[in-house]
Image: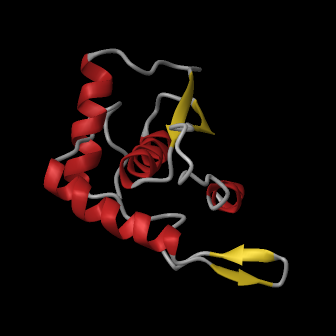
Amino acid sequence: DNKDEGFLFGAAEDATSAWAEGAAGNMANTVAKAGGVQFAAGSLKPKIPGTLRCLVAEAVREFHMIGEGDKVLVGLSGGKDSLTMLHVLLELRRRSPVKFEIGAATVDPQTPEYDPSPLVPYMQQL
């Protein structure tokens, strides 16, 4: 894999959806293991489609969303959209010459069904 020039990455909606379904499905298939949690292979470092990576990076560059030394906070619900964004940003950070930090926080939609507890061990293992 070559490093991309700055933020020249991208995202197509169908690629996002297909990738995200797999990533979210992997997170849902956790297995308890000796006091910890083990996640499905590939769920912690999924392969991001180049088209998705390129579109996101292109938008970041065009609208000057991330600069050197920035700190980016990703709001996570545990759904496919927020997990996709987190993993795309992690991949951009890995490939980009622009150095920035990434943090994550849960976003509570104030519904009784929402349970962010599966995100805790997932985030700890990232």
From the top left corner, tell me how far across and down residue 2 is, in percent. 34, 52
Outermost residue toward the front in this view: 112
**Residue depicted at x 72% and y 56%:** 124
Task: Give the quarter of the image for residue 23.
Answer: bottom left
- Image quadrant holding the N terminus, namely bottom left
The vertical placement of 2 against 75, above or below, is below
Outermost residue toward the top in this view: 64
Give the colour scheme of this rendering: secondary structure
Depth check: 76 or 8 in front? 76
Outermost residue toward the right in this view: 35
Question: In the displayed structure, does residue 27 sit left or right of residue 34?
Answer: left
**Residue depicted at x 52% and y 78%:** 29
From the top left corner, tell me how far across and down residue 67 is, in percent. 47, 18
From the top left corner, tell me how far across and down residue 5 is, in percent. 31, 35
Question: In the displayed structure, does residue 59 sit left or right of residue 126?
Answer: left
**Residue depicted at x 50% and y 71%:** 28
- Image quadrant holding the C terminus, namely bottom right
Q: How many marks?
A: 0
Question: In the displayed structure, does residue 54 sit left or right of residue 40?
Answer: left
Depth check: 29 or 112 in front? 112
Task: Give the quarter of the image for residue 44.
Answer: bottom right
From the top left corner, tell me how far across and down residue 89 is, in percent. 44, 41
The vertical placement of 78 against 62, above or below, is below
